[in-house]
Amino acid sequence: MPLAIAECSHGPGQVRHDCDILPIIEGCVMAVFEVPREGLRISSRGKAEVAFARQVAMYLAHVVAGLTLTDVGRRFGRDRTTAAYACRLIEDRRDDPAFDKRLAALEAAIQSGFSRLSAAERAGQGGNG
Protein backbone atom coordinates (compact mmCIF):
# COMPACT_ATOMS: atom_id res chain seq x y z
CA MET A 1 0.00 0.00 0.00
CA PRO A 2 1.33 3.49 -0.80
CA LEU A 3 2.94 5.15 2.19
CA ALA A 4 0.99 8.37 2.24
CA ILE A 5 -2.30 6.51 2.27
CA ALA A 6 -1.23 3.74 4.67
CA GLU A 7 0.42 5.96 7.25
CA CYS A 8 -1.41 9.26 7.17
CA SER A 9 -4.96 9.05 5.93
CA HIS A 10 -8.04 10.66 7.44
CA GLY A 11 -10.24 8.77 5.04
CA PRO A 12 -10.07 7.32 1.53
CA GLY A 13 -7.55 9.35 -0.43
CA GLN A 14 -7.19 12.10 2.16
CA VAL A 15 -3.59 12.62 3.19
CA ARG A 16 -2.79 14.73 6.24
CA HIS A 17 -0.55 17.71 5.57
CA ASP A 18 1.62 16.95 8.62
CA CYS A 19 2.55 13.55 7.15
CA ASP A 20 3.47 14.89 3.72
CA ILE A 21 5.96 12.60 2.00
CA LEU A 22 6.68 15.01 -0.88
CA PRO A 23 9.55 16.83 0.92
CA ILE A 24 11.22 13.45 1.52
CA ILE A 25 10.82 12.53 -2.15
CA GLU A 26 12.16 15.90 -3.26
CA GLY A 27 15.12 15.69 -0.87
CA CYS A 28 16.11 12.24 -2.11
CA VAL A 29 15.75 13.22 -5.78
CA MET A 30 17.68 16.45 -5.21
CA ALA A 31 20.55 14.52 -3.61
CA VAL A 32 20.72 11.78 -6.23
CA PHE A 33 20.31 14.00 -9.29
CA GLU A 34 22.07 17.07 -7.83
CA VAL A 35 19.34 19.55 -8.69
CA PRO A 36 17.95 22.40 -6.57
CA ARG A 37 14.44 22.20 -5.11
CA GLU A 38 13.43 25.19 -7.24
CA GLY A 39 14.30 23.13 -10.32
CA LEU A 40 11.77 20.49 -9.37
CA ARG A 41 8.99 23.07 -9.13
CA ILE A 42 9.99 25.58 -11.81
CA SER A 43 7.16 26.45 -14.18
CA SER A 44 9.27 26.05 -17.31
CA ARG A 45 10.77 22.77 -18.48
CA GLY A 46 14.32 23.85 -17.62
CA LYS A 47 17.44 21.88 -18.45
CA ALA A 48 17.07 18.26 -19.50
CA GLU A 49 18.71 17.01 -16.28
CA VAL A 50 16.31 19.01 -14.15
CA ALA A 51 13.27 17.94 -16.18
CA PHE A 52 14.29 14.29 -15.82
CA ALA A 53 14.79 14.65 -12.05
CA ARG A 54 11.31 16.23 -11.84
CA GLN A 55 9.85 13.31 -13.80
CA VAL A 56 11.47 10.87 -11.35
CA ALA A 57 10.04 12.84 -8.41
CA MET A 58 6.59 12.84 -10.01
CA TYR A 59 6.81 9.09 -10.60
CA LEU A 60 7.82 8.47 -6.99
CA ALA A 61 5.05 10.73 -5.70
CA HIS A 62 2.53 8.65 -7.65
CA VAL A 63 3.97 5.17 -7.09
CA VAL A 64 5.47 5.37 -3.60
CA ALA A 65 3.22 7.99 -2.00
CA GLY A 66 0.08 6.91 -3.84
CA LEU A 67 -0.90 10.41 -4.91
CA THR A 68 -3.30 10.62 -7.83
CA LEU A 69 -1.91 11.92 -11.11
CA THR A 70 -4.03 15.03 -10.63
CA ASP A 71 -2.47 15.62 -7.19
CA VAL A 72 1.03 14.92 -8.49
CA GLY A 73 0.54 17.39 -11.33
CA ARG A 74 -0.83 20.02 -8.97
CA ARG A 75 2.01 19.58 -6.45
CA PHE A 76 4.61 20.04 -9.19
CA GLY A 77 2.79 22.85 -11.00
CA ARG A 78 1.89 20.62 -13.93
CA ASP A 79 -1.17 19.09 -15.55
CA ARG A 80 -2.23 15.52 -14.74
CA THR A 81 -1.38 14.48 -18.30
CA THR A 82 2.18 15.70 -17.74
CA ALA A 83 2.34 13.63 -14.55
CA ALA A 84 1.01 10.61 -16.47
CA TYR A 85 3.65 11.13 -19.17
CA ALA A 86 6.39 11.33 -16.52
CA CYS A 87 5.21 8.07 -14.96
CA ARG A 88 5.15 6.28 -18.32
CA LEU A 89 8.60 7.60 -19.20
CA ILE A 90 10.16 6.50 -15.91
CA GLU A 91 8.41 3.13 -15.99
CA ASP A 92 9.85 2.54 -19.48
CA ARG A 93 13.32 3.50 -18.27
CA ARG A 94 13.10 0.82 -15.56
CA ASP A 95 13.88 -1.72 -18.29
CA ASP A 96 17.49 -0.54 -17.90
CA PRO A 97 18.86 -2.61 -14.97
CA ALA A 98 21.20 0.16 -13.79
CA PHE A 99 18.41 2.74 -13.73
CA ASP A 100 16.02 0.29 -12.10
CA LYS A 101 18.56 -0.38 -9.34
CA ARG A 102 19.02 3.36 -8.80
CA LEU A 103 15.27 3.93 -8.63
CA ALA A 104 14.77 0.98 -6.26
CA ALA A 105 17.40 2.52 -3.96
CA LEU A 106 15.53 5.84 -4.09
CA GLU A 107 12.26 4.10 -3.23
CA ALA A 108 13.92 2.36 -0.27
CA ALA A 109 15.42 5.63 0.99
CA ILE A 110 12.05 7.37 0.76
CA GLN A 111 10.27 4.56 2.56
CA SER A 112 12.92 4.54 5.28
CA GLY A 113 12.77 8.31 5.71
CA PHE A 114 9.00 8.33 5.83
CA SER A 115 8.86 5.43 8.29
CA ARG A 116 11.21 7.29 10.62
CA LEU A 117 9.18 10.49 10.32
CA SER A 118 5.94 8.61 11.06
CA ALA A 119 7.52 6.83 14.05
CA ALA A 120 8.80 10.13 15.43
CA GLU A 121 5.36 11.71 15.01
CA ARG A 122 3.67 8.77 16.77
CA ALA A 123 6.20 8.97 19.62
CA GLY A 124 5.56 12.69 19.97
CA GLN A 125 1.81 12.14 20.07
CA GLY A 126 2.12 9.44 22.72
CA GLY A 127 3.09 11.95 25.39
CA ASN A 128 0.23 14.32 24.58
CA GLY A 129 -2.70 11.98 25.18
Image (cartoon, helix red, strand yellow):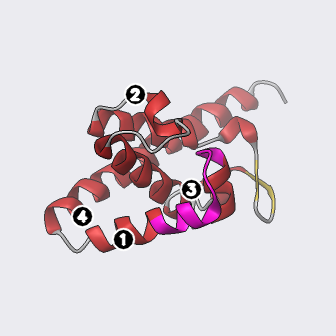
Question: Which percent across, then down, holds residue 23?
Answer: 54, 35
Question: Which percent across, then down, holds residue 86?
Answer: 45, 62
Which callout, 1 or 4, points at the residue further toward the start of the chain?
A: 1
Q: CA distance from mark 2 to mark 3?
A: 21 Å
Residue bounds of the magenta highlight? 75-85
Q: CA distance from mark 2 to mark 4?
A: 23 Å
Which callout, 2 or 3, points at the residue further toward the start of the chain?
A: 2
Mark 3 crowd level (few <14, some 14–19, many ≥20, 10 Å Cα):
many
Question: Which residue does the image show at 59% across and 67% down from the upper left?
Answer: 81
Asked whether, in this view, residue 121 is left or right of residue 50, the answer is right
Q: CA distance from mark 2 to mark 1?
A: 23 Å
- Nearer the observer: mark 2 or 3; the answer is 2
Q: Is residue 75 visible?
A: yes
Q: Which residue is mark 4?
A: 100
Q: Which residue is mark 2?
A: 36
75, 118: nearer the viewer: 75
C-beta proximity under 8 Å, tags 2 and 1: no
Q: Is residue 68 visible?
A: no
Which callout, 2 or 1, points at the residue further toward the start of the chain?
A: 2
Which callout, 3 or 4, points at the residue further toward the start of the chain?
A: 3
Question: Which percent across, then down, holds residue 55?
Answer: 42, 54
- Nearer the observer: mark 2 or 4; the answer is 2
50, 68: nearer the viewer: 50
Numbered disc 3: secondary structure: loop
Tell me, for residue 91, which label it has, or none: 1
